[in-house]
Amino acid sequence: MAELFGFQVPGAVTLFIIVFGGSFLLLAGRYIAAYLNAPESSDDRFEWATNRTARWLGMIFGGLLATAAVAITQGVDIVAMGTQFIGMHPFVVSNLAGIGLGAGVLSGNIQLTTDQYVGLALMAVFGTYLLSEVYGVDG
């Protein structure tokens, strides 16, 4: 627990107060700067400063949304590249063969001893190696 103005408050509440309080102070400072820099020919300095601050705030939110969109796109692209590598790699065939063989043995549909299972799984691995590396056959 953190202490804020003599009260014990959880850390999340403190973070909330700091973030939104800082944002409010930043926005108020931007508004005051826009109000003081309003042109003298302006009829309503309040309206001019409000419009100027609203446009500035819109640009900030637009930048944050664009950043989030790029981050989501990049994250999806990384997952897609990983999936493509795993799915298109030749050794996925031997892995699936070993998994399928093991699932068949564990479910009782295929009757194999441990030595037979290991031999068949290694045969799938080395068969895939021969096809992909020696003969150049890609998945």
Image (tube, rainbow, N blue to C red):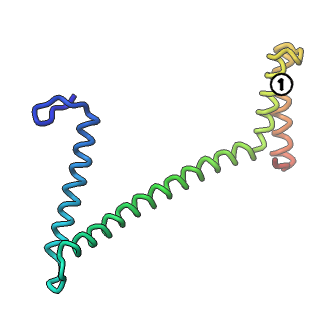
Q: Quadrant of residue 123?
A: top right
Q: Residue at x 85, y 40 (%)?
A: 130
Taking the view exactly as shown, the residue that stands out farthest to the left is 6
| Residue 83 image position (x, y, % from top left) | 67, 45
Residue 76 as seen in the image, left or right of residue 88: left
Residue 73 as seen in the image, left or right of residue 114: left
Q: Residue at x 27, y 72 (%)?
A: 52
Q: Tell me: residue 80, above or below residue 28.
A: above
Residue 100 as seen in the image, left or right of residue 37: right
Q: Residue at x 23, y 75 (%)?
A: 48
Q: How many marks?
A: 1
Q: Tell me: residue 65, above or below residue 37.
A: above
| Residue 99 image position (x, y, % from top left) | 77, 27
Reading the image, the residue beneath label 1 is 101
Identity, as a three-letter code, of the amino acid under mark 1:
Leu
Q: Quadrant of the N terminus?
A: top left
Q: Is the residue marked by circle 1 packed among few (<14), some (14-19), or many (20+) residues within 10 Å?
A: some
| Residue 98 image position (x, y, % from top left) | 79, 28
Q: Quadrant of residue 89?
A: top right
Q: In front: 44, or 66? A: 44
| Residue 97 image position (x, y, % from top left) | 82, 31
Describe the element under mark 1 as helix, strand or loop. Answer: helix
